[in-house]
Amino acid sequence: MKSANEATGLDYRQRICRAMNFISANLGRDPALEEIAAAANFSPYHFHRIFTAATGETVFGFLRRLRLEWAANRLLANPRDDVTAVALDCGFSSSQNFAKAFRARFGTTPTAFRRSKRGNKPRNAGEAGSFFVGQDAGKVKLVSPQPERKIEMNAIVKEMPAWHVAYARKIGPYGKAVCEAAFGELMRWAGPRGLIGKGPMMGMYWDNPEVTAPEQCRTDACLPVPPGTKVDAPIALQEIAGGPYLVCEFDVPITGFGAAWEETFRTVVDRGLECADQPCYELYHDDCMGKTCRFDVCVPLKKK
């Protein structure tokens, strides 16, 4: 049985995740501290200190970092977009403020950053592009060379359902350790409640590791649950939006996840698809505990 202090700490983790999700969904405007606190059922009086203690960042430091990372993703994905337009779209009041904040975060100017990244440098024949969708990476219009595919896949655009999911969140470098920790926590909650096997397991990845520091990347292990399901901290609930998605189906060695994501975003580029302002997710068709894994990478697309 958890102590009162342990229960309070777990409840705070759950509610801080809700606050982080609210901020992520409102990067294009200036949400008030009271709004963010209310989204997580906190009193605004103590919320700022609680958020900082839980995340290591202030509320508005977290907001500014996500805006800068959103802008960096836009610069990588849309090499023809005007820097000032990107700055304003991503919530900055002027290009001057954006340039100053961008240099402080990335150590270079937005234009130099765009030129330095592999996805936007002139490519040699046969060299693949590199893209990752974060907040509104949209309007990918580059035409990249067509090197030989590293792995086989089936890629289709189709309507995906909305999912009501329970999730466990871990923050840290993408990879086996963080995924096992997140899914382990989710399974320990779901197993005794008879929820395993009722729907596909999913992994949601919120951040671009080319832009976000590895120790700040967010991974959600997700499981669809019936409406009205009650959760206990540290498990929380969220909605995964339905709509058009690029769905890339893979059956690869367990070490092939990175290559699968590369192939997925080459397909985004090759087809000139416009990505929506939502995180991507993986949908698993087996438990991925053996030498191979069957899964889909699902990339949200803008509705036409």
Image (tube, rainbow, N blue to C red):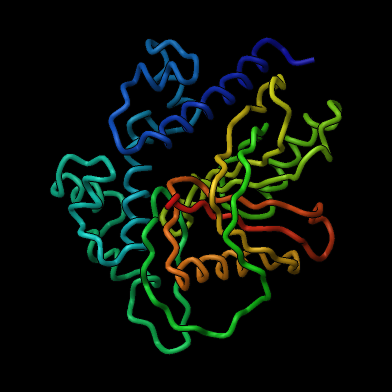
Quarter of the image for residue 294 reads bottom right
- Residue 282 in the image: state x and y as whole percent: 64, 52
- Residue 254 in the image: state x and y as whole percent: 75, 64
- Residue 118 in the image: state x and y as whole percent: 39, 72
Which residue is at a point 41% across and 13% down the rendered structure image?
46
Q: Is residue 179 above or below residue 138?
A: above
In the picture as drawn, the residue positioned furthest to the bottom comes out as: 125
Q: How many marks?
A: 0
Q: Nearer the viewer, residue 182 or 131?
A: 131
- Residue 113 in the image: state x and y as whole percent: 29, 63
Which residue is at a point 55% across and 54% down the rendered structure image?
245
Which residue is at a point 45% across and 24% down the rendered structure image?
51
State left or right for residue 292 relative to residue 227.
right
Q: Is residue 60 above or below residue 199?
A: above
On-image quarter of the N terminus: top right
Q: Is residue 51 above or below residue 304?
A: above
State left or right for residue 160 relative to residue 96.
right
State left or right for residue 183 relative to residue 300.
right
State left or right for residue 198 relative to residue 299.
right
Which residue is at a point 74% across and 68% down the rendered structure image?
252
